[in-house]
Image: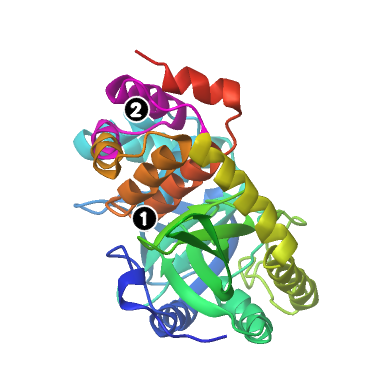
Amino acid sequence: MSTVMRPDSRGHKEALTFEELQAKVVDLQARKVDYVVDTRRVGFFDEGSDFAISIDGVNDVSFKVGDRAHKQIAGRLKIPRIYYDRMRKDAPQLLQRNVEHWFINQPEKRMIRAYNGEEPVVRAFLSDRYRRLDNFDLLQHLGPELGKIDGLEYHVGSLTPEKLFLRVTLPGLEAPIRVGDMVRAGVEISNSEVGSGALQVRPYILRLVCMNGMVSNVALRRYHTGARVEETEDELGIYSDETLKADDKALFMKAADLVRASLTEASFATIVDRLRDLTATDEIQAPVAAVQVLGDRLDLTEGERERVLTQLVKGADLSQWGAINALTETAKDAESFDRLVELEEAAGRLTELDAQEWARVAVAA
């Protein structure tokens, strides 16, 4: 697999070259530490500017609670997020008493995923059944397999606090949607180490005229659920990798097989035929009204709706294909790479609207 990055393919401030992605994954892998521990052994306290936790048995170390972990603690303790965030900001001692009360009075074992180092941080607060599929292992196993696919190129990737994204394309597998509008076959592989989603392999379509992408339906989804891990007195339930390596390897090999299957001429032709059909759909009659309908359906923010409308008018294509391209162009300005992917997923869902569903968008007034 070539690791050449096209200068115009980064597209977002959080996009990484393959070398940057590898280096970041390796650096963070060295800092990881996992504990499975009874919540009665977990201290939760106000540290002045934010919150931290301590774990009984882990001496002289406190971990700052990251935003993702805060969300998970609130959800697990059934504290409404609005109220949790209000206490976090305006009444930290009240939040401390709330969390500690439930940790002690409704105890359970939880997996705490953290980073050590100069700034120790809790990155996730998860079930003791959480099945780790770590990004380092994913790249170690999947990278060489992808390298065996003739002509495959790395396109772009990112490592956000929520997920790893890796996108590859096959320059030899391209087709026109219409004259002068070529698309290329690709695949997106994504994974979360913090409970933000399953390991997924999905078809990815790259539009060459603007280097915008679109994520299609899921080819593989593997959830992070496994056997319950028992806490041990001396190791605080720290996971051993040895019992999981064989299963991980088999899963990553399956992911590589699905990448190959997604990059066949037959699979690509099915997607291309569908996209060609979308160039001849009913045209939007009232762009402002149509974008509001799409915005409601796809859960777009007001700012995103405005950008979609701008791109729709600018592109002068009021077909279903034109609306999809307005959405993928808007994705480039997303506040995070996670949101960029969500918008490209929305574009993929937009391709699935049948003629009747699209007609309701086109005639919206």
Label 1 to label 2, Cα distance in Å?
36 Å
Q: Quadrant of residue 161?
A: bottom left
Res. 92 in view: no
Residue 150 lies, with reference to residue 218, above or below; the image says below
Residue 312 lies in the magenta-colored region: no
Which residue is more in the foreground, 56 or 31?
Answer: 31
Q: Is residue 306 left or right of residue 343?
A: left
Q: Label 1: which residue?
A: 66
Look at label 1 and name its amino acid.
Answer: Gly
Name the quarter where the C terminus is drawn: top left
Q: Which mark is residue 82?
A: none
Q: Is residue 155 left or right of residue 119?
A: right
**Stretch in magenta:** 281-308
Q: Quadrant of residue 85?
A: top left
Which residue is more in the foreground, 305 or 33?
Answer: 305
Look at label 2 and name its amino acid.
Answer: Val
Instruction: Answer few, some or many: residues within 10 Å of disc 1's Cα (few below 14, many 20 plus, some between 14 and 19).
Output: some
Q: Label 2: which residue?
A: 291
Task: Look at the image and name its color scheme.
Answer: rainbow
Res. 251 in view: yes
Instruction: Report the predominant secondary structure element of the magenta stretch.
Output: helix
- Between label 1 and label 2, give the one nearer the viewer: 2
Say if mark 1 contacts mark 2, CB within 8 Å.
Answer: no
Q: Quadrant of residue 199?
A: bottom right
Which residue is more in the foreground, 299 or 191?
Answer: 299
Residue 306 lies, with reference to residue 10, above or below; the image says above
User: Horizontal and vertical percent for residue 31?
Assistant: 44, 78
